[in-house]
Image (cartoon, helix red, strand yellow):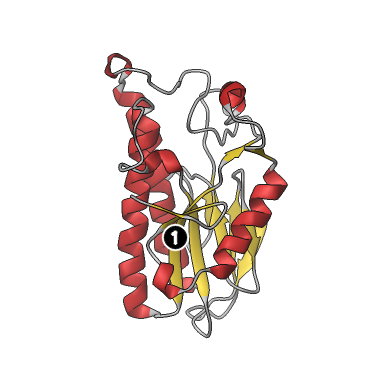
């Protein structure tokens, strides 16, 4: 997916290759919703290309589970490589994307940078435990977004930087866990994309730094 955003610091538009799922963008309002990125990608000359490389060379957007990674049910399952991979993709990747993208947001009206977070990254909302790496990496992302929002607000008062929780979406990421999803709470990717863009449309600068669910509710950190 190629997205062009107007840049006030460069003579030509900046092209972003976003190879993630889910991803949504609305160019006119400088709104970008990002999934997860590996920092071991090209971030040179304003060109951003994000993807997760599997050992077999295939591109894989899954960062909760794959052939060798599963959500931990106990501290007995903690693994240094799994923790590092989750942090790399869920926290470090979006931080480096923000580093290059935020200076190019439009300054003449509201502009939004939104990254895909998750409710399970909320420390206050954690009541059942488990999922150590995924929870911790999303909590780290929330802290990064809050810190970015503070600096962004000093530069461009109308800018917004937030995390978004899409709910349980019918993708390969949630497939192993869908049996436990209550009726009516498994959403299509199209529904989620539409809802998240509506949420972002309704936010203003006072919401910057927060974490918001697909229905617009603010989630505590």
Report which quarter residue 171 is drawn in.
Answer: top right
> With 63 as the anchor, is 137 left or right in this view?
left
The answer to which of 97 and 182 lies nearer the viewer is 182
Seen from this angle, which residue lies furthest bottom? 108
Place of residue 38 in the rendered image (x, y in percent of width and height, measured from the top left):
46, 42
Q: Is residue 42 visible?
A: yes
- Residue at 62%, 60% (x, y): give it: 197
Q: Nearer the viewer, residue 125 or 197?
A: 125
Nearer-the-camera pick, 79 or 56: 79
Q: Where residue 196 sits in the image (x, y, percent)?
A: 59, 56
Q: Which x, y percent locates residue 167? A: 56, 42
Q: Residue at x 47, y 64 (%)?
A: 101
Q: Is residue 152 left or right of residue 167?
A: left
Q: Nearer the viewer, residue 108 or 193?
A: 193
Residue at far top of view: 76
Q: Residue at x 57, y 28 (%)?
A: 57
Element at badge 1? Answer: strand
What residue does disc 1 label? 162
Note whether 201 is above or below 70 in the view shown.
Answer: below
Q: Is residue 105 above or below residue 94?
A: below
- Quarter-of-image position of residue 98: bottom left
Name the residue at the front extreme.
183
Q: Is residue 153 above or below residue 162?
A: below
Residue in the image at 48% along x and 45% along y: 37
């Amino acid at each position: 997916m190629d997205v062009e955003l107007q840049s006030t610091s460069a003579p030509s538009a900046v092209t972003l290759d976003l190879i993630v799922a889910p991803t949504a963008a609305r160019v006119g309002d400088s709104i970008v919703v990002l999934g997860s990125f590996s920092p071991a990608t090209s971030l040179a000359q304003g060109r951003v290309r994000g993807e997760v490389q599997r050992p077999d060379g295939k591109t894989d957007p899954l960062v909760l589970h794959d052939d060798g990674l599963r959500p931990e049910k106990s501290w007995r399952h903690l693994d240094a490589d799994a923790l590092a991979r989750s942090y790399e993709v869920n926290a470090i990747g979006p931080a480096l994307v923000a580093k290059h993208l935020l200076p190019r947001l439009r300054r003449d009206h509201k502009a939004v940078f939104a990254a895909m977070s998750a409710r399970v990254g909320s420390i206050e909302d954690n009541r059942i435990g488990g999922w150590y790496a995924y929870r911790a990496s999303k909590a780290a992302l929330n802290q990064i977004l809050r810190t970015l929002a503070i600096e962004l607000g000093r530069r461009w008062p109308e800018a917004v930087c937030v995390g978004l929780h899409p709910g349980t979406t019918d993708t390969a990421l949630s497939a192993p866990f869908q049996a436990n999803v209550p009726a009516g709470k498994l959403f299509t990717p199209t529904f989620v994309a539409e809802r998240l863009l509506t949420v972002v449309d309704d936010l203003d600068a006072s919401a910057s730094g927060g974490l918001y669910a697909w229905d617009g509710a603010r989630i505590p950190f």
